[in-house]
Image (cartoon, rainbow, N blue to C red):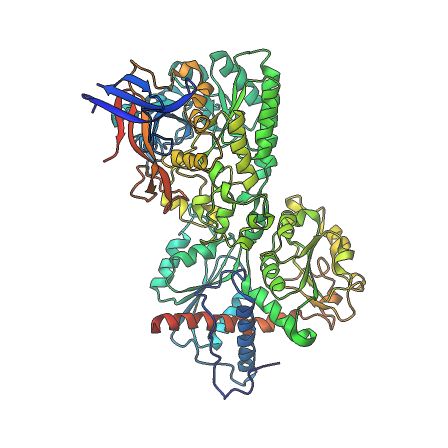
């Protein structure tokens, strides 16, 4: 799959066009910049194939992983990625709290910077929090997911996974369906930007209560690029090339947005039967963690068409690429 | 200057007599001795784009945070900010700590106002409910005796319909209005930004316009029910921000009910796209000619990082259509006043995550400039705009407040001289308020206040 496997052993790709000090969302990325991330991830994929998957690209750089919200795959994926690049990694599992209850984000970021962090990978349950960190932090901020707003590394690893699976590696005109709790999903929001940027025919589908507001967005498009919003799961899945199921959380029942998980599973769950409406070779995705038997049937999750574990594996390569590219802007600034 | 004589020529605007034009004023010993409207020949070069002479402005809605949160504002700093903004009368909301629910708190604020030495008049609202808890009535009669000009639980709506009904009846019999903050809190629990395109894209919890319109409709229905029993009952709905909410007020007025409302400078001038990083005036968003340009991600209007907490305010900044509706209803006088909802906050409360930032914009010093910018853009005639900042608010308060804005000969001068042709930079240092929490920081605004006289005394004079 690599485009760079003919490079000399040990060489690292050159980030010639990368100008972003922070990665806060994918909305600011142009298609060539997204392509650069993909190519760089290819290189990192090659690194990961070596017996000792380690390069010195980030040697001497401090990467602080600052998570205000529970996470397994994203946190570990970033940690492995940073270590593979020889960064000095510090993990902080911060208690999520408002200013009245604990140290403010501003103070925490200043502390982390004083302790020598060059990059912060941040997860926070309030939309926009990484922008506040970026405003005050002297290094680079990489958004590991903020509230309902954005999850750029997930969107890019989803894209990377799809390109490796789709014939020709192109999403142009491919029907991609994101199915589930779109309203509360940062994965869906970031994917709206990246998938439409790559020319996909994007459909967002779920119960009307979990799509609220998206009609306004679809009416304008993502920076004018059209996508479709519907509660009609049959219409959404018809002839789909890709179906991504999103996690349904129990809190949605307490807040009156869904009658029950049982009813959700019956009406919107991704089952083999529903999947028959999609193309025979349709790719099945899920950003995890899964509620098997709710938004995705267990046999669909492990179906040959499912790339769910591949998504996790690709996550490390894509996050290595992102850390590498952001570190490159740092070197450029220091050298300038 | 209170001891001397001064002559000022400029474009005078006096809503109390419905007149504007070139004029010459003479002020002697603080008294407006002479006001001469100039003939066309004499008025050469005097236009509304130059020096304006206005009656002292009246703010129906300000928060000066004393007692209880003097880090954010004090009565003294609030009054200095008001004067800098051209206001010679301010009405203070009772969401202090403790709340203004009994006369001793009124006395304390009065004492702070006197001690400040400011000639700006301080009017005070009492709370509707004891402790603003929405359960039982405050000491309304005693507060009225202490001189409050109305009652409000501002910050929240009077949630209980029964308590609002009783408050309208009781305050109505005292001859005082109820000022309600319309919000159906069940619809806004955890809400962060106006429901629609911007909130959806940014992943912010939507704040539906129905939360305002529904609350307005409820309160008007209750008013309709009680007004037969107590003809003095009056309802004023503050900081209406949506087209639907304004329409509900308009409908109530159409039935002849004693209901009024105000809009804020920020809901007139700013829209929710500012949270995405756009920095266009509401009237500069091309809504009709080119529908795509309303989307800041398409039109290239995004020039700043998103999620700036100075934009977090209750009610939230709305759509361009809502802002346009605010101007339209000012024009129809269904919205009778522009009230600042001046809400100063400390950096500790504001420099945090967007969803956790406290609501409010420090706005009393930029209000006149923002309104003049809208007037210059053709949103409202100058005379109507100044009426909404002077005679409109006093009509809401009624005669009991004893405020009568106007340029009247023989009375102590109460006026603002503002250079509409000059601009000023909104910087933290330029603001007299302790609250630097305005999204207009860094902006260059039209309308430089040169001189403010309140009750014949200098409240502000440009250095």
> Residue reaching furthest left?
B3
Q: Is residue A195 above or below residue B44?
A: below
Quadrant location, the N terminus of chain B = top left
Residue B273 drawn at (x, y percent):
51, 47
Residue B376 drawn at (x, y percent):
43, 36
Q: Say whether residue A284 is visible.
A: yes
Q: Is residue B446 above or below residue A113?
A: above
Residue B422 drawn at (x, y percent):
33, 39
Q: Is residue B266 above or below residue B337?
A: below
Picture residue at 44% right of the left edge, 24% below the top: B387
Q: Is residue B403 or residue B174 the one in the foreground?
A: B403
Residue A57 lies in what quarter of the image?
Answer: bottom left
Q: Say whether residue A80 is visible.
A: no
Residue A186 lies in what quarter of the image?
Answer: bottom right
Q: How many marks?
A: 0
Q: Is residue A15 or residue B187 the one in the foreground?
A: A15
Q: Is residue B232 left or right of residue B33?
A: right
Quadrant location, the C terminus of chain B = top left
Q: Is residue A173 left or right of residue B296?
A: right
Q: Is residue A13 or residue B392 the one in the foreground?
A: B392
> Residue reaching furthest front?
B41
Residue A136 drawn at (x, y percent):
38, 57
């Amino acid at each position: 799959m690599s485009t760079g496997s003919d490079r000399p052993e040990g060489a690292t790709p050159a980030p010639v066009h990368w100008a972003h000090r922070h990665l806060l969302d994918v909305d600011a990325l142009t298609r060539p910049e997204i392509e650069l991330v993909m190519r760089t991830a290819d290189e990192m994929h090659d690194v990961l194939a070596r017996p000792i998957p380690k390069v010195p690209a980030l040697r001497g750089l401090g990467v602080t992983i600052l998570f205000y919200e529970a996470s397994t795959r994203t946190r570990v994926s970033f940690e492995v990625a940073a270590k593979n690049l020889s960064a000095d990694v510090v993990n902080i599992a911060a208690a999520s709290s408002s200013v009245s209850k604990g140290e403010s984000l501003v103070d925490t970021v200043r502390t982390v910077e004083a302790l020598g962090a060059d990059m912060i990978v941040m997860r926070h349950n309030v939309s926009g929090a990484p922008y506040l960190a970026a405003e005050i932090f002297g290094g680079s901020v990489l958004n590991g997911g903020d509230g309902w707003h954005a999850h750029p590394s997930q969107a890019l690893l989803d894209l990377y996974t799809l390109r490796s699976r789709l014939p020709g590696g192109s999403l142009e005109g491919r029907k991609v369906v994101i199915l589930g709790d779109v309203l509360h999903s940062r994965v869906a929001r970031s994917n709206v930007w990246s998938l439409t940027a790559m020319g996909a025919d994007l459909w967002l589908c779920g119960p009307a209560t979990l799509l609220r507001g998206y009609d306004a967005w679809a009416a304008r498009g993502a920076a004018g690029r059209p996508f479709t919003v519907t509660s009609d799961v049959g219409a959404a899945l018809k002839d789909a090339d890709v179906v991504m199921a999103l996690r349904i959380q129990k809190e949605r029942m307490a807040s009156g947005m869904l009658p029950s998980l049982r009813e959700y599973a019956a009406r919107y769950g991704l089952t083999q039967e529903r999947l028959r409406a999609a193309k025979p070779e349709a790719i099945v995705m899920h950003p995890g963690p899964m509620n098997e038997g709710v938004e995705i049937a267990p046999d669909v999750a492990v179906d040959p068409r499912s790339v769910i574990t591949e998504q996790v594996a690709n996550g490390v390569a894509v996050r290595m690429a992102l850390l590498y590219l952001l570190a490159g802007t740092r070197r450029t600034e220091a050298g300038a | 200057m209170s001891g001397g004589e001064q002559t000022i020529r400029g474009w005078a605007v006096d809503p109390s007599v419905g007149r504007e034009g070139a004029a010459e004023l003479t002020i002697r010993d603080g008294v407006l001795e002479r006001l001469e409207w100039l003939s066309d020949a004499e008025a050469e070069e005097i236009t509304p784009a130059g020096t304006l002479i206005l009656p002292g402005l009246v703010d129906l809605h300000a928060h000066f945070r004393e007692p209880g949160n003097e880090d954010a504002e004090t009565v003294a700093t609030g009054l200095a900010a008001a004067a800098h903004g051209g206001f010679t009368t301010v009405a203070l909301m009772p969401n202090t700590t403790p709340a203004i629910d009994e006369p001793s708190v009124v006395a304390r604020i009065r004492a702070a106002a006197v001690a400040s030495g400011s000639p700006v008049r301080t009017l005070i609202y009492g709370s509707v409910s004891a402790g603003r808890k929405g359960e039982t009535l405050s000491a309304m009669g005693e507060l009225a005796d202490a001189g409050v000009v109305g009652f409000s639980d501002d910050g929240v709506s009077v949630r209980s319909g029964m308590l609002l009904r009783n408050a309208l009846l009781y305050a109505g019999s005292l001859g005082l209005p109820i000022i309600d903050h319309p919000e159906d809190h069940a619809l806004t629990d955890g809400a962060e930004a106006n429901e629609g395109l911007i909130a959806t894209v940014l992943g912010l919890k939507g704040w539906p316009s129905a939360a305002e319109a529904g609350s307005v409709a409820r309160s008007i229905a209750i008013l309709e029910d009680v007004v037969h029993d107590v003809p003095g009952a009056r309802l004023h709905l503050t900081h209406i921000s949506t087209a639907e909410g304004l329409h509900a007020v308009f409908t109530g007025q159409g039935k002849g009910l004693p209901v009024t409302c105000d809009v804020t400078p920020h809901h007139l001038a700013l829209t929710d796209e500012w949270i995405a990083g756009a920095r266009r005036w509401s009237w500069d968003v091309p809504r009709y000619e080119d529908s795509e340009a309303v989307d800041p991600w398409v039109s290239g209007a995004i020039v700043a990082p998103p999620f700036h907490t100075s934009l977090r305010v209750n009610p939230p900044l709305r759509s361009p259509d809502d802002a346009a509706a605010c101007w339209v209803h000012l024009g129809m006088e269904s919205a009778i006043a522009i009230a600042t909802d001046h809400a100063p906050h400390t950096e500790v409360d504001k420099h945090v995550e967007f969803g956790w930032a406290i609501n409010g914009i420090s706005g009393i010093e930029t209000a006149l400039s923002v309104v003049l910018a809208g007037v210059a853009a053709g949103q409202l005639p100058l005379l109507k705009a100044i009426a909404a900042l002077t005679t409109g608010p006093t009509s809401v308060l009624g005669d009991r407040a004893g405020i009568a804005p106007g340029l009247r000969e023989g009375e102590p001068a109460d006026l603002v001289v503002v250079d509409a042709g000059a601009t000023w930079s909104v910087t933290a240092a330029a603001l007299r308020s302790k609250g630097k929490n305005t999204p207009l920081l860094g902006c260059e605004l039209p309308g430089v206040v040169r001189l403010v006289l309140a009750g014949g005394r200098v409240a502000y004079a440009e250095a």
